[in-house]
Image (cartoon, grey):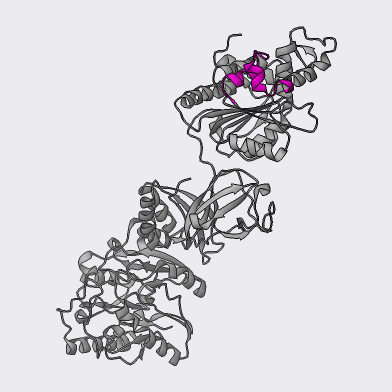
Amino acid sequence: MSRLLVCPPEYFQIDYEINPWMRRTNAVLASRAVSQWQALMRVLEQDVGAGIARMHPVEGLPDLVFTANAGVVVGRRALVSRFRYPERQREEVYFEQWFRGQGYEVLTLEKTHYFEGAGDLLGFPDTWFGGYRQRTDIRSFPTLSELFQREIIPLELIDGRFYHLDTCFCPLSGGELLYFPAAFDSYGLAAISERIPAEQRIAVPEEEAVRFACNAVCVEKHVVIPAGCPRTMHVLHDRGYRTHAVELDEFMKSGGAAKCLTLALD
Amino acid sequence: MAPSEETVFLQGHIIDSLILAKVLDTIVMMGATFDLQDVKIGATREAPSQARIVIRAPSNRALADILRAIQPHGAALEREADCRFESAPAAGILPDEFYATTHLPTQIRLDGEWVDVEGSEMDLAIYVDPAKAHARTIPMGAVQVGDLIVIGRDGIRVTPLARPAERDVFGFMESVVSSERPHQPVIADIAQRMQMLRERYRQGDPAAKVLCAGGPAIVHAGGRDALTWLVEAGYIHVLFCGNALAAHDMEAALYGTSLGYGLTAGRSVPHGHEHHLRTINRIRALGSIEQAVRSGVVTEGIMAACVRRNVKMVLAGTIRDDGPLPGVVTDSMQAQQAMREEVQGVGLALLVASTLHAIATGNLLPATVPTVCVDVNPSVPTKLADRGSFQAVGLVMDAASFLKELARSLGWRP
């Protein structure tokens, strides 16, 4: 059974602006955020059958809810993120504490190299892709590659709206890739084409990319996707996936959706 | 040496991700060139690859822009250390770990800045004055106690020669020495260079001097008139030779013989073996070669031409010398130093028929100076070529034939 780390949105709000989605004037409706998050949990637990591990929210850390950025977990080893912005650097210690509390072997990177966890590192069983430039420093990948013995193909993120790889790139369990090509440059697209054949690549239209169609959670043949992405859902249906649309617009105010709210543990 | 050069290091899965391609494209698009050094491709798919890239930009500003542009893609400045130095323990003694120079342009890093080392010459040490951010090459024998000498290999950068712009025999970047090589086109290229250098020399270019280092075979073999003409016509500006070339040249002027052989008759003349001794004695009595020419005793020949044309001469003595002639420097280290001073500003070197002077001169020259070595013995040009300078052309041929053909190419009509 897949297990996902999540953090309840009790303190979720927009306290600062560190990506183009965040506007302090565009306040989060707290009760709506809580109900959207609870709906997401219900789908994940009941419809998808995933196991959920909850960590404690911390007052003053509104983005702790985006657990995808806690780090990256492989087996019993957890590598903790080093956030680029000081606003989120304060989360590192809580994520680390949680991993230690659960008995993970905790690994850390050099302080000078930013790495924002599974938000910027996604992959297929033998090849991983790493998003860089907006948040993660490309120089963290050789270390990660060595630690986990995986090939990591760095992809430059060229559009500020898609500041983490998981906002524009979503590997699916059947080997397909859901992605928004315009978020990458020609080198990145060529590298993706080299690894993933054309028939396996599913390009998301821009109007759904900005609805976070790629910020989906795929567990076996289930895809949990933010509501408002009918064309993507249609393509996924045709490919044999069961899709679950969840309203997550309160979290999109902060630049995140389903995938950002979870971290795959096993 | 271009001040706008920097080495960066790139590692990770840089090949399949096209990160390396992106970095190289960026460098070229921003108007610089690069050298890819030490590219190591990961042995397995998981193993990272790495590349060291030397960037050469047209200016420091362009270089800074490029470094800023490629840094986000992981290109890290190679962590260069400053060079290390140590005091010379005694006069004439270098610190144990001293750095031995090459004849290529060299820089050292002082306080994070790259400083050009003055005076490219092989097999020397580097003297450094950190307070003035100044460095120059220094021969072992010239070192004073306490001089700061560069040691080890950190913080030292040697620049390989760029391909010369001229498309002549010197531009081929090869140093093949062959007796079968057709001489005529090579000599034509040398003549063309000399024509160009004479023009520049006349216009006051301080780096347009032509140096000739020669042995007495020039006189014995009949190349005297041709060399005399080359000097008279202003094609030669510096002459390195020994006691013998000067003695036999003036012997020819006074007696018409070279080591006792009649130069026109072609056979030995009675008591001819004494001629060079009598010549040397005569010049010694006059006090100097210059005096012998100015007073009208020696009226023609190489020495006379050199004196009249104010050609700088360094006459270096050896243990088999007779006399020697006045002006011959018998202390080898002093002679070497005098030659070192005169190679400054040399734009072409002709090393003709003298193993000793050819090798000594070759060792003093920076690799950037085009060099022609002419000898009937292939081992001499080969030795010169082995210095690793691709601007060295070796001709296996007789000195007189070479000089005559060269002079004829430049308009000599005997």
Q: Nearer the viewer, residue B226 or A42?
A: B226
Furthest toward the top, the residue is B265
User: Does the segment drawn in magenta span residue A173?
Assistant: no
Identify the image quadrant of residue B320: top right
Furthest toward the left, the residue is A25
The C terminus of chain A, quarter of image: bottom left
Compared with B359, A7 (above or below) is below
Compared with A42, B150 (above or below) is above
Residue B315 place in picture, x, y as percent: 68, 29
Q: Is residue B217 shown left or right of residue B340?
A: right
Q: Nearer the viewer, residue B327 or A41?
A: B327
Q: Residue at x 28, y 83 (%)?
A: A63
User: Does the segment drawn in magenta span residue B289?
Assistant: yes
The N terminus of chain A, quarter of image: bottom left
Q: Residue at x 39, y 46 (%)?
A: B58
Residue B328 place in picture, x, y as percent: 71, 30
Identify the image quadrant of residue B342: top right
Q: Is residue A212 shown left or right of residue A133?
A: left
Residue B124 place in picture, x, y as percent: 64, 47
Task: Give the residues in magenta.
Answer: B284-311
Q: Total marks drawn?
A: 0
Q: Is residue B302 visible?
A: no
Q: Residue at x 54, y 13 (%)?
A: B411
Q: Nearer the viewer, residue A177 or A209?
A: A209
Compared with B381, B130 (above or below) is below
Residue B165 place in picture, x, y as percent: 47, 34
Q: Is residue B247 visible?
A: yes
